[in-house]
Image (cartoon, rainbow, N blue to C red):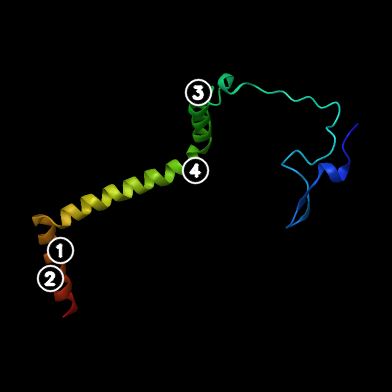
């Protein structure tokens, strides 16, 4: 014989009736439901994680390479050109070129 409903339920001052912990709402257990469990020392939560991570990253990167590689190549080439140009313009021959260019422009303006 089961206890009566008021006997099994507890009073909750905030919400009225206490339904129970998560998954235990105070009713009879359902029939025909089988639950299985594994001992915590037998579980392997990271089994195969490293292998799956490496190959998953490779697969996803291979699929996206045409989206991110061209902008990186263009940016690298642009930065390489800008660094070389900056080094030249701040060297002695670059300063002389800039001086003569400015001198020619000022003469043409007159």
Disc 1 vs disc 3: which is toward the camera?
A: 3
User: In the image, is 84 to the left or to the right of 26?
Assistant: left
Please determine whether, in this image, residue 20 is positioned above or below residue 15: above
**Distance of mark 4 from mark 3, alpha carbons?**
25 Å
Identify the mark nearer the N-term, 4 or 2: 4
Is there a contact, CB below 8 Å, between mark 1 and mark 4?
no
Name the residue rendered at 64%, 21% in the picture: 38
Q: Residues within 10 Å of mark 4 (few under 14, many from 20)?
A: few
Residue assigned mark 2: 103
Across and down, in percent, residue 107 comes to 14, 75
Residue assigned mark 3: 51
Please determine whether, in this image, residue 92 is positioned above or below residue 63: below
Across and down, in percent, residue 90 comes to 14, 57
Secondary structure found at label 4: helix
Identify the mark nearer the N-term, 1 or 4: 4
**Distance of mark 1 from mark 3, alpha carbons?**
58 Å
Secondary structure found at label 2: helix
Residue assigned mark 1: 98
Is there a contact, CB below 8 Å, between mark 1 and mark 2?
no
Name the residue rendered at 16%, 66% in the picture: 101
Disc 4 vs disc 3: which is toward the camera?
A: 3
Please determine whether, in this image, residue 47 is positioned above or below residue 4: above
Residue assigned mark 4: 67
Disc 4 vs disc 2: which is toward the camera?
A: 4
Is there a contact, CB below 8 Å, between mark 2 and mark 3?
no
Is there a contact, CB below 8 Å, between mark 4 and mark 2?
no
**Distance of mark 1 from mark 2, alpha carbons?**
9 Å
Q: Residues within 10 Å of mark 1 (few under 14, many from 20)?
A: few
Name the residue rendered at 49%, 30% in the picture: 58
Secondary structure found at label 3: helix
């Amino acid at each position: 014989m089961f206890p009566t409903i008021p006997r099994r339920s507890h009073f909750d001052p905030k919400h009225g009736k206490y339904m129970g912990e998560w998954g235990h709402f105070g009713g009879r257990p359902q029939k025909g439901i089988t639950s299985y469990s594994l001992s915590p020392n037998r579980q392997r939560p990271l089994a195969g994680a490293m292998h799956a991570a490496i190959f998953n990253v490779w697969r996803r990167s291979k699929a996206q390479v045409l989206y991110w590689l061209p902008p990186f190549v263009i940016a690298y080439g642009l930065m390489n050109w800008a660094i070389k140009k900056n080094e030249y313009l701040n060297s002695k021959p670059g300063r002389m070129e800039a001086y003569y260019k400015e001198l020619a422009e000022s003469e043409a303006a007159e």
